[in-house]
Image (tube, rainbow, N blue to C red):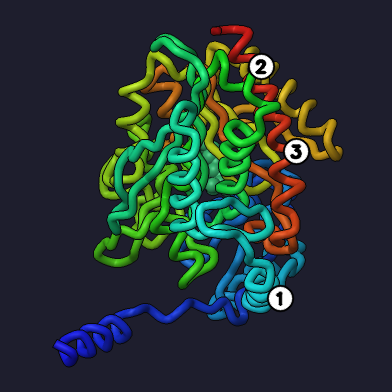
Amino acid sequence: MKFLVFGLVCLGLALAEEPFHYDGYKVYQIVPRTEEEAYYLKALTEEPGFDFWAYPRALNATVTVMVPPDVQVGFENDLEAKNMHFEVLINDVESTIRDEDTRQRMSRSAARGSVSFTYYMRYNEIVSYLTTIADTYPSIARLIVIGHSYEGRAIVALRISRGTGSNRPEILVDAGIHAREWIAPPVALYLINQLVENTANAYLSQDVDWVIIPSLNPDGYEYTHTNTRLWRKTRTPNTLCYGVDPNRNFDYYWMVAGASSSQCSEIYAGPRAFSESETQALRDYLHANSQRIKLYLTFHSYGNYLLYPWGYTSALPANNEELYALGVRVNDAIRAVAGTTYSIGTSTNLLYAAAGGSDDYAKGAAGVELAYCIELPGGGNVGFNPPATSIWPIVQETWEGIKAYHDYIRDKYA
Ligand code: 0X9
Ligand code: ZN
């Protein structure tokens, strides 16, 4: 038995993947000045290896892209040949990630079952916090498992309600669909913390119910902690590469724009719509509760955008004015805290066309009229890696925006 255990441990170690390092990876910033330049950059978004942190979206808007060492010379030569000016934002991604990692290891502190905003909590800690909340406040909070990830992790949600009756408006919130966007889960956790544990906020769940999913892509999220900090997708094995971009995998005009059919692309839409158990879980929750859900918020990073549908077309939704006006209220509330501002508009018109997103699906297929994808602020010089010290300011200012959303939903539906 001992030998069997020893053998299994060795096998496990042998199979365990080595952490991925970003030695020599550079991050470039380029501002396309002409249609040709923009076209050249857009074509690169389909190329495996090029990891766009800010996609080409308009002339004169800065594009940010991480490039591995082996293609840097060719890339720089191309840019020079085309007379395109570029700047190197990060010379060695590995060292910036390592610095931040060291700082975070030093700041870990939360006790089991509690929440912390001084470091990025792991998936198990998040589940343990939600479980404790549900156990401690059974009349207000209930734990729901909406599905499981590819690797079998529970996708947990917390339903928060201080009211009775079944016909109450609901706000559905998720975070972490993109694994590397670490600032998103803490925003969802702070929402839970404030709604349940701060009695001054009891009024916020009096007339409106909340369902909050802090980690929609737990396999990817854990992988960013253990192996590859900048992993974006799920962890489903495909024949050539791992993972599907879950925010290209929803079945609403799937694959019509801004999505890739190549497995190794960061925006791989999957072999078919809803190929991923993570997106199926959200789909099923949306449909089972579509009558009640009046607002859907999905937290991403980075770039300070309040995006709303559509992402598959530049056409405006019928309630564009309402979506924009509500965005303005939310932006005002956030700005009042420390001056942070967001740009507001449809995904396609403000950012880029990208079909198969959860926001488009919630609105187009599940009938949730108000849906937003919130691109939180970036941080440090690695946009997806705000230092743990920025968790507090970001969650606090965002909380004010979420309260503005609540007030609108209460006044309109409750
Ligand atoms: O591209 C995305 O999925 C989102 N940006 S991110 O940098 N976080 O990856 C924006 C999605 C906006 N919504 C749709 N295109 N439907
Ligand atoms: Zn994202």
CB atoms at circles 2 and 3 under 8 Å apart? Answer: no
Select label 1 or label 3 by which is in front. 3
- Residue at the spot x=28%, y=55% of the render? 152
Q: Secondary structure at mark 2?
A: helix
Residue 37, x across and y down, in percent: 66, 53
Q: Amino acid at mark 2?
A: Asp
- Give the residue type at disc 1: Asn
Outermost residue toward the front? Answer: 136
Q: Earlier in the sequence, mark 2 or mark 3?
A: 3
Spatial CA distance of label 2 from label 3 is 16 Å
From this viewpoint, is residue 296 visible? Answer: yes
> CB atoms at circles 1 and 3 under 8 Å apart?
no
Residue at horizontal 70 percent and vertical 72 percent from the top: 103
Give the vertical position of 374 relative to 47 (above or below): above
Q: Nearer the viewer, residue 227 or 56?
A: 227
Disc 1, SS: loop
| Residue ID for mark 3 | 397
Q: How many marks?
A: 3
Q: Quadrant of residue 346?
A: top right
Q: Secondary structure at mark 3?
A: helix
Q: Residue furthest bottom?
A: 3
Question: Looking at this view, is 210 or 230 the one in front?
Answer: 210
Q: Which mark is residue 407?
A: 2
| Image quadrant in which the C terminus is located | top right
Q: Which residue is mark 1?
A: 91
